[in-house]
Image (cartoon, rainbow, N blue to C red):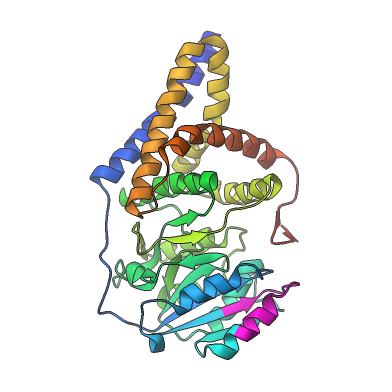
């Protein structure tokens, strides 16, 4: 029993200390970037769309409304064998806006599959110096292009932004995770990109040979990020209202768990130290449950303390991107987080193939 309690306290202590240090990073090591008002390179915005009839119009409207010279950017949309009305909707948008170009993707390029394959095709058609990427269910801020460009210099290959979700609990979950990623980035430990809110320079993308030449991963943004870093390019992480975008939440528990399983598959490819910290996060709630049976007052105190730390991180990120969250929701968020974390851990270990966008991987 003594050994069990000691292991539990070790796991809990590591998680609490990590959260505390990352929170401090937001206050004392936070790196901000100004919006670039005068630099207007030609930009290619790449959007992969598969069965997005309910969301693609909002996405395209936000891209058309960007506060950027209209002759300085193009919008390339890849229709990934959609079986709904996506193709006809895209045809209508293309007929009304000359800077929207639609491509129907039916063949594979090299090792690329799914979204990575669509993006690989689109980059072949793109004319821009920068490849901005977002998803068909996202709505971008009018200053999105300028905000991410503000972090660019000649040594930078990838710039990433913050994404919020129009769902209370998933939104807080994303802000907590992305807040930790931003903190690590600012501590000079960049770990991952954000495939629906980022850009990669043409130079960096071509240096790695494109998606068709790099190993396929269901987390295509992470693989791109890794390969660009290997080539010696720097990365930047921007957290601001101007660079933030909004995406739809996942509906249905099974779909949510599939998303988490996809993320976890990517996460285990990270640096061993990061994987260790993620493992401690995954073991935190089981460890706290065990502790509850031995020392329930201590377990409750730790639960409340962790909820406070987590809430402070979420609140800081939300304030930074000017998307405030309700205090009452932040109080309850720890319960949501504990439930999803426990169920996701079990689901990840089950020998099911991963289904994403109606495809199995």
Above/below status of 250 relative to 2: below
User: What span is colored magenta in the figure?
Assistant: 77-92
Residue 198, horizontal then vertical, whole percent: 44, 66
Residue 12, horizontal then vertical, whole percent: 46, 25
Q: Which quarter of the figure is the N terminus placed in? A: top right
Any part of residue 252 in sight: yes
Residue 136, horizontal then vertical, whole percent: 57, 69
Residue 297 in the figure: left or right of residue 187: right
Residue 93 in the figure: left or right of residue 127: right
Residue 2, horizontal then vertical, whole percent: 51, 9
Q: Residue at x 69, y 69 (%)?
A: 51
Q: Residue at x 53, y 85 (%)?
A: 100
Give 230 or 26, whichever is nearer the viewer: 26
Q: Residue at x 50, y 44 (%)?
A: 173
Q: Quadrant of residue 87?
A: bottom right
Q: Quadrant of residue 113?
A: bottom right
Any part of residue 210 in sight: no
Residue 293 in the figure: left or right of residue 238: right
Q: Is residue 45 magenta?
A: no
Q: Quadrant of residue 104?
A: bottom right
Give 153 or 356, whichever is nearer the viewer: 356
Give 16 or 312, whichever is nearer the viewer: 312
Above/below status of 354 relative to 65: above
The number of discs equals 0
Q: Which quarter of the figure is the C terminus placed in? A: bottom right
Q: Is residue 87 magenta?
A: yes
Above/below status of 153 relative to 302: below
């Amino acid at each position: 029993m003594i050994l069990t309690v000691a292991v539990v306290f070790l796991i809990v202590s590591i998680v609490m200390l990590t959260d505390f240090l990352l929170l401090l990073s937001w206050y004392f090591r936070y790196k901000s970037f100004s919006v670039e008002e005068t630099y207007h390179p030609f930009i290619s915005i790449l959007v992969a769309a598969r069965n997005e009839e309910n969301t693609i119009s909002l996405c395209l409207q936000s891209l058309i409304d960007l506060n950027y010279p209209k002759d300085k950017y193009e919008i390339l949309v890849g229709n990934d064998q959609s079986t709904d009305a996506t193709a006809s909707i895209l045809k209508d948008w293309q007929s009304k806006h000359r800077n929207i170009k639609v491509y129907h993707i039916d063949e594979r390029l090299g090792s690329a599959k799914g979204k990575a394959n669509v993006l690989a095709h689109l980059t072949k058609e793109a004319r821009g110096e920068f490849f901005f990427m977002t998803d068909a269910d996202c709505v971008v801020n009018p200053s999105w292009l300028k905000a991410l460009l503000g972090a660019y210099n000649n040594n930078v290959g990838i710039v990433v932004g913050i994404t919020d979700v129009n769902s209370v609990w998933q939104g807080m979950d994303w802000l907590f995770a992305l807040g930790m990623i931003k903190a690590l980035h600012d501590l000079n430990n960049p770990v991952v990109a954000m495939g629906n809110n980022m850009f990669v320079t043409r130079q960096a993308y071509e240096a790695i040979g494109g998606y068709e030449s790099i190993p396929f991963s269901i987390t295509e943004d992470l693989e791109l990020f890794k390969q660009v870093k290997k080539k010696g390019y720097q990365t930047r992480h921007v957290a601001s209202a101007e660079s933030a975008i909004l995406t739809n939440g996942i509906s249905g528990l099974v779909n949510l768990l599939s998303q988490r399983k996809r993320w976890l598959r990517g996460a285990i490819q990270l640096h061993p130290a990061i994987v260790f910290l993620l493992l401690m996060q995954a073991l935190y709630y089981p460890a706290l449950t065990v502790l509850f049976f031995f020392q329930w007052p201590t377990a409750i105190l730790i639960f409340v303390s962790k909820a406070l730390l987590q809430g402070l991180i979420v609140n800081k990120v939300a304030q930074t991107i000017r998307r405030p969250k309700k205090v009452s929701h932040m109080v309850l968020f720890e319960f949501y987080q504990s439930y999803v974390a426990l169920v996701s851990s079990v689901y990840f270990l089950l020998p099911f193939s991963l289904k994403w966008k109606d495809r199995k991987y």
